[in-house]
């Protein structure tokens, strides 16, 4: 069964840090291109960061320099280290991948950043 399960969200104050995790099962994780998206209240989903391979990372301009995406292939886990959080970072964070033309999403983890 293919599953993506996010964790690590919570309440943070402006300037604090959080680390999100996404455990993936049912795939050969090391072969997958992985991405993080987020959805703020009342808005559409926004791409945050991507990791097409173990050595290649990409970031949205809004998080560049503050967020770091990484992966541990042996543990089939994707991470998002979020530093210096701001209220605009509030939202539900999802990990996602695509396999054989089908997109797979986790259920998300909620991050709330207060000023």
Image (cartoon, rainbow, N blue to C red):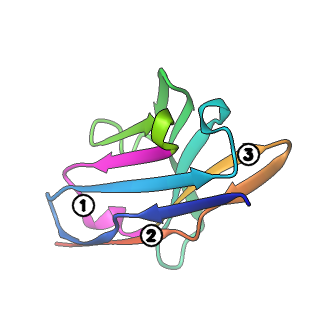
- SS assignment at label 2: strand
**First to last magenta residue range:** 77-91
Label 3: few (<14), some or many (≥20) within 10 Å?
Answer: few
Q: CA distance from mark 2 to mark 1?
A: 17 Å
Cα–Cα gap, marks 3 and 2: 19 Å
Q: Position of residue 94 (x, y in %)?
A: 53, 61
Residue 26 on image: x %, y % = 69, 51
Residue 76 in the image: state x and y as whole percent: 52, 43
- Give the numbered dot on residue 86: 1
The residue at which mark 2 appears reads as 109
Taking depth in this image into account, of 54 and 42 the one nearest to the observer is 54
The image quarter in which residue 63 lies: top left
- Do the residues bearing badges 3 and 1 touch, measured as CB atoms within 8 Å? no
| Quadrant of the rendered image containing residue 52 | top right
Could you tell whether 55 is left or right of 106 in the image? left
The C terminus: image quadrant: bottom left
Determine whether, in the image, residue 106 is placed left or right of residue 27. Answer: left
Q: Is residue 101 above or below residue 32?
A: below
- Badge 2: few (under 14), some or many (20 or more) residues near its Cα, within 10 Å? many
Residue 75 vs 21, above or below: the answer is above
Q: Earlier in the sequence, mark 3 or mark 2?
A: 3
Q: Residue at 58% x, 52% y: name it.
A: 24
Q: Earlier in the sequence, mark 2 or mark 1?
A: 1
Residue visible at 35% across and 38% down in the picture:
64
Which residue does the numbered mark 3 point to in the structure image? 98
């Amino acid at each position: 069964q293919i599953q993506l399960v996010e964790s690590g969200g919570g309440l943070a104050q402006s300037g604090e840090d959080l680390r999100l995790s996404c455990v993936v099962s049912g795939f050969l994780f090391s072969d997958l291109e992985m991405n993080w998206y987020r959805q703020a209240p009342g808005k559409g989903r926004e791409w945050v960061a991507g990791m097409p391979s173990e050595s290649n990372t990409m970031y949205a301009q809004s998080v560049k320099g503050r967020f770091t995406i990484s992966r541990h292939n042996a543990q089939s886990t994707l991470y998002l280290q979020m530093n210096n959080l701001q209220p605009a970072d509030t939202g539900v964070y999802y990990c996602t991948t695509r396999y054989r033309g089908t997109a797979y999403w986790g259920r998300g983890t909620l991050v709330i950043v207060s000023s």
